[in-house]
Amino acid sequence: MDKSGTSRQEDTAVATQEVFRVSNLSVRSRGKTILTQVNVTIEANQVFGIIGPSGAGKSTFLRCLNRLSDLTPELKVDGRIEYHGRSINDPAIDPDDLRARIGFLFQQPVVFPKSVLENVTFGLRHLRRLHRAALAEAAERALTEAALWNEVKDRLDDSALTLSVGQQQRLCLARALATEPEVILMDEPTSALDPKSTQAIEDLILSLKERHTIVLVTHNLGQARRVTDWLACLCVREGGGTIAETACCDALLENPQCQEVVEYLGAGDTLTSS
Amino acid sequence: MDNIFTGLAGLAAVLAALPLVIMVAGILVRGLPAISWRFLTEQIRLVGADGGIFYNLIGTLILIGVAILICAPIATGLALTQAVFLRNQAARARLGLFLYTLNGIPSIVFGIFGFIVFVNYLGWGKSWLTGGILLAIMILPTVTVALIERIKALPAKYVEAATGLGLRPSQVIWSVILPQSWGGLITGSLLGLARAAGETAPIMFTATIFAGATLPHGIRESPVLSLPYHIFILAQDSFDPAVGAKLWGSALVLLALVFALSVVALPFRLRMHEEAHG
């Protein structure tokens, strides 16, 4: 087993389009290592899952992919992240354009204290100059795509804070979808939700991957099994998180090769069975 | 031991509140008889012994109105610089020190500064604009700090969510940060204005005269009347009982104005408190 972790992805690689290629990514914050030597490739129209113990840097990794990490000045990001073959830190790349193409769904739904309609068009209104009618059309399309249209079509002008948490999370998804991003990064999007809303989000993830690439951080191994195509397990090694193993979903969950992953999955099983 | 401590603390509170109560009561008792519709709507007559304070009230409102119009955009820029743009802790600390130093400058120094720069050097003479500018500089720290506190209390998730959608920093500021922190601007402004409304020192050499001015016309040689300077002058003449009544009336009107500004600020401050701790 080599030090950078086993990767069986290359062996089975088919001619799919590569969206992200991360090489030697390291992240430090105030002298403390968060991620070290992360190498991974993420391909188009897949649900790429990231599992691993708390504190292994899963969220930090996700934030690096669309440079949301720029907002935290104490994070020192080293290494190379390519998006469609170009480094995202290339001076010619505008981080705001990058984020418009790579949406983000947070752990807790973040709705603005505005109406449902204003929330769903929040990004769109600022990124493109659209007429009211076009805006309303885009809002309906995004809400339909997020399976929320039927529930909110009669209360578009109500405050988004009156929606249930599950609805709010789908509203956030609709808001991200409205700007038609290619990739959607999801940071434990169902951890604050009840089972029914979780089910709704999982169904959405499966339908969205036809047109989008999804990177999903999850704590829920059942969820990983249900929705992901590829899985990477981030484990803490030498004080920093690194990808211990990458494999297609079933292979990683059924037959993990790396001792840390075996231990993590074992702990997860005990947790779910108890 | 605890009881003694509680008792001493309570005594301190009473000692602090007592002068305020006595002062307000004194001004109310002596000022109320002077207050009438005529007093508020007529101009000064007989060197303050008769007539009202209409143009003094208008002048003070002009001064604080101009002050806030000048101060608000500058305070907004300063607060955004401090709370959003400056990433360097040392630079933030320097800007903070600047604000606290500015806040500590005695008001008479502003008066002298304004006299040298605007009245003499620029040759404006006494002008409402000079008064507005000086009061704006004086309240700048109060307004800026209130806005900074408000921006810092804003949950980071909103900024992250908007940035994650691909909004530019300027769009995040206009659509997320400012709409959700304008309460801080209002609170700071009202508290600053409550203080500015009563200041005499910065305006007495630069912007206000005792009698003979109505509404300003142009900038040069265009003073206004004002409440605090009116009180200052009348206080020197108050052995005349007619003047005395007008003096207390003016003091009451000024007190009411300041009180009103503080009360209007109260709901915004309470809401801020709730959001910070609720």
Image (cartoon, helix red, strand yellow):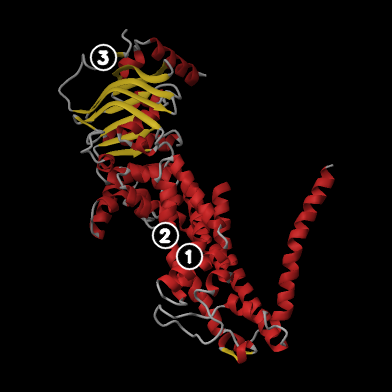
Q: Amino acid at mark 2?
A: Ile
Q: Amino acid at mark 1?
A: Ala
Residue B114 at x, y percent in the picture: 48, 68
User: Cβ–Cβ below 8 Å for labels 1 and 2?
Assistant: yes
Label ID, residue A8: 3
- In the picture shown, does residue B50 fall above or below B4? below
Residue B167 at x, y percent in the picture: 31, 47
Which chain is indicated by disc 3?
A
Label ID, residue B74: 2
Q: In the figure, is residue B59 to the left or right of A247?
A: right
Q: Amino acid at mark 3?
A: Arg
Quadrant placement of the N terminus of chain A: top left
Q: In the figure, is residue A56 to the left or right of A6?
A: right
- In the picture shown, does residue A75 fall above or below B222? above
Total residue callouts: 3
Which chain is indicated by disc 1?
B
Real-space Cα separation, disc 3 to disc 1, in angstroms = 67 Å
Real-space Cα separation, disc 2 to disc 3, in angstroms = 59 Å
Which chain is indicated by disc 2?
B
Question: Image quarter for residue A133?
Answer: bottom left
Q: Are marks 3 and 1 on the same chain?
A: no
Label 3: which secondary element: loop
Number of residues whose C-alpha sits closer than 10 Å to that of mark 3, classed few (under 14), some (14–19) or many (20 or more): some
